[in-house]
Image (spheres, rainbow, N blue to C red):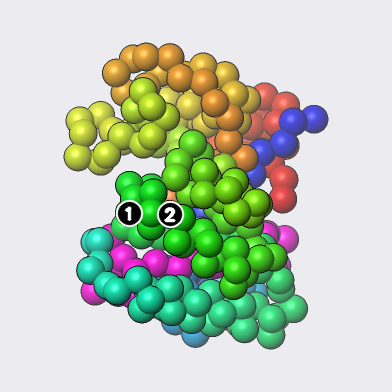
Amino acid sequence: MQTIDINCDLGEGKTAADCARDAQIMPYISRCNIACGGHAGNLTTMQLSVANARRNGLLVGAHPGYPDPDNFGRVSLKIELGSLLESIWEQVNRLRDVAGEAAVRLDHIKLHGALYNDAEADRALAERLVGFLAEEFPALKIMGLANGEMEAAARRHRQPFIREGFMDRRYLNDHQLAPRSMEGAVISELDLCLAQALCLAQGRPFESCSGAPLQFSVDSICVHGDNPNAAAIAQRLLLHFQSQGIAVRR
């Protein structure tokens, strides 16, 4: 049976109530990326998120971002590279310590927001980031955009890489994500999202934002946890895959 992974960025709130909402998504996914105090998250949310992930049998990864909680890590931060790498190191280790106390082993690292996008727009930055992650956290896979700069850098460093695809974003003809500023870059109709997710999982053709045919496969589909309907969307995605004979599995 074909399998696919569904991932979601979680632990980005501030309270136990936020974590309880996140927990409603967990039965329908296979992997979560937990914020670790850079763009969002605190000790309470990390502890509760890890505990809930363990209860639901999820793979757990670190979700570091620019240390800029005021902007939720969604703005490119002018920060010296050494300081950025130090912050990422602190964030990942902070979550690793929390996970270790709960007998949970971290599986991967996925960058957040503007840092994720900046690495894809800057080959040199992607190279430095992947080189740093491969050296400091060799046992952790890197999750990032399929066909992007982080994947290419991971291949050069022989670091395991999880190719991520997006069900609710249009792609450019070069397989890169269409910027949100472009009209039609975000897919709002759930049926269209589900159709694109299936194509990405099966490596079947789908249309770019300009209508050109694209065809590539991914290892994991992202569900956005900050969507108010995230749990319902994740459930629909899981059921859609199952109806097509695809198992969602760690």
Residue 20 in view in this figure = no
Residue 85 in view in this figure = yes
Given the image, on which type of amino acid does mark 2 rest?
Answer: Ala
The kind of secondary structure element at disc 1 is helix
Residue 149 position, x and y percent, is: 44, 45
Is there a contact, CB below 8 Å, between mark 2 and mark 1?
Answer: no
Which disc number belongs to residue 126?
Answer: 2
Residue 192 position, x and y percent, is: 42, 25
Residue drawn at x 69%, y 65% is 139
Q: Is residue 72 magenta?
A: yes
First along the sequence among labels 2 and 1? 1
- Judging by the rendered image, the residue that carries numbered circle 1 is 118
Q: Nearer the viewer, residue 33 or 64?
A: 64
Magenta stretch, residue numbers:
54-74
Taking the image as shown, residue 22 lies to the left or right of residue 104, namely left
Q: Is residue 191 above or below residue 128?
A: above
Given the image, on which type of amino acid does mark 1 rest?
Answer: Asp
